[in-house]
Amino acid sequence: MPRPVDDSQPRLAAGCRWGGGGDEGKMILFPEGAIRVQGTGRKILDRCDGQNTFREIVQELQAHYTASEPAQIRDEVATFLEQLQQKRIVDF
């Protein structure tokens, strides 16, 4: 599957949604199960609304994690989204 490009607009795939209780207990529910997403993964998925572009998501994270290399952040976000796309949790 292709990696996201700058203009990609990641969003939860059909049949996937946020669920669970409270902010700490939020999970992504999908037809085959559920996953709890915390930390940076949560920051990424919170922005996957079909409106934000991949470029915008990466730029927000680069501004937040200034001690990390921008290219590394971009690569890790792309890898994370690609893995979730393979599991049919995210589309872009």
Image: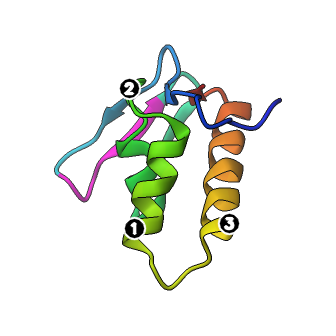
Q: Cα distance, mark 2 to mark 1?
A: 19 Å
Q: Nearer the viewer, residue 75 or 35?
A: 75
- The numbered disc on residue 63 is 1
Circles 2 and 1, Cβ within 8 Å, touching? The answer is no
Above or below, 42 against 12 in this view is: below
**Image quadrant for the C terminus?**
top right
> Which secondary structure, mark 1?
helix
Residue in the picture at 83% in, 29% down: 1
Of labels 2 and 3, earlier in sequence is: 2
* Residue 68 falls left or right of residue 39: right
Residue in the picture at 38% in, 26% down: 51
Of labels 2 and 1, earlier in sequence is: 2
Q: Cα distance, mark 2 to mark 3?
A: 23 Å
> Which secondary structure, mark 3?
helix
Residue under numbered circle 2: 51
**Amino acid type of the residue that numbered disc 3 sits on in the rendered structure:** Ala
Residue 24 percent location from the top left of the image: 25, 59
Residue 77 percent location from the top left of the image: 60, 54
Foreground tag (2 vs 1): 1
Residue under numbered circle 3: 71
Residue in the picture at 71% in, 41% down: 82
* Residue 24 falls left or right of residue 28: left
The magenta stretch spans which residues? 23-29
> Which secondary structure, mark 2?
loop
